[in-house]
Image (cartoon, grey):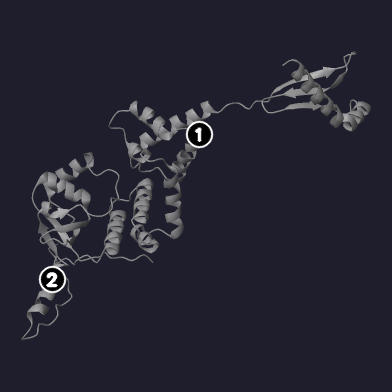
Amino acid sequence: MARNIFNQPPKDETGSAVPSPTPPKAAKLPGSVGGLRDSLREITANSIRDIEPDQIDMDGLRDRLVLEDSSIDELAESIRKHGQQVPIMVRPSTQPDRYRIIYGRRRLAAIRKVGGTVKAIVRTLDDDASLIAQGQENNLRLDPSFIEKSLFIKEMQESGYKPGVIQDALGLTRQGVSNHRVVIEQLPDGLVQLIGPAHGIGRRQWGDLAALSVKVDLVDNAKEALAALPDDTPSSEKFQAVYSACSSKARSDKKPPNRGLTSVINDENGRSLGTLTIDEKAIALKVTKKDNPEFGQWLEEHAEATLLQLFVQWRNERGSGS
């Protein structure tokens, strides 16, 4: 079972956050200053605080392809009217009075547009726990698209996170992680950024597009297809336009098989002796034994010597003509 680290602070009847019910360590006198400081730090680490946005650094791996888009403006307007309803999560930085974001990047970007402080849960988490929190919260609030998950998995693996942490972060099995990674590895760099998150486009469709990479240049064809679309075209429609253009290009570039030129060889009476087929790769002489059993038998016995004789004749003619 995936680890769940969303131990959100409990709320009282008015809906405001209250400190964790975990009691602080008992203070001892004398020498109680250190213990009291640790207890206060523990309480603070499990509470919601108002923090200035410029105190928060955009830390960690990005799990969204698009962060600054029209939806940020919509979220900012909602926060301006109704306030911030859901806190973000941060962890203390190594620098004093600074924090590193764990999740809530879109909310932070929106509040930076609106102005004012941001409500944040402050947790002291290591890198693995922070990544799991980021992935789990993102899945709960707005399920990322297949390709966003694939890119996130690729970044996590390249950053050295262990398989168990990656599985917990996205709630996937080992096979699920592998399915995402197989597709993203087949896609050329830059293609996903051109198309966008493409919500609703799943593994099979992305896999079909990736398969076309052996036949056509996906990036060049994508740029050409997207240039004809309006700037505000949804990314799922961009995907469909790119896939259609690449599929059409692959079909038009497919050359029909060269079956060669076949001619019938007849004797002086017009009876068929066999066929001669010539193409780019070979010259083939075919004699049907059923139609010419005796000649077929003779040719079988003399084919090697006859071919050698023709070769010697060609070589002599070639030598005398040089």
Q: Nearer the viewer, residue 88 or 124?
A: 124
Query: Which residue position holds label 2?
Result: 41
Q: How far separated are the C-alphas under marks 1 and 2? A: 59 Å
* Kind of residue indicated by mark 1: Lys
* Kind of residue indicated by mark 2: Arg
Q: Is residue 276 above or below residue 181?
A: above
Q: Nearer the viewer, residue 156 or 227?
A: 156
Query: Which residue position holds label 1?
Result: 215
Residue at 11% x, 45% y is 114
**Residue 287 visible somewhere in the drawing:** no
| 298 to the left or right of 310 | right
| 200 to the left or right of 309 | left
Residue extending furthest toward the right: 294
Q: Earlier in the sequence, mark 1 or mark 2?
A: 2
| 29 to the left or right of 293 | left
From the top left corner, tell me how far across and down residue 260 is, in percent. Answer: 69, 23
From the top left corner, tell me how far across and down residue 251 is, in percent. Answer: 52, 29
Give the structural element (helix, strand or loop) at label 2.
helix
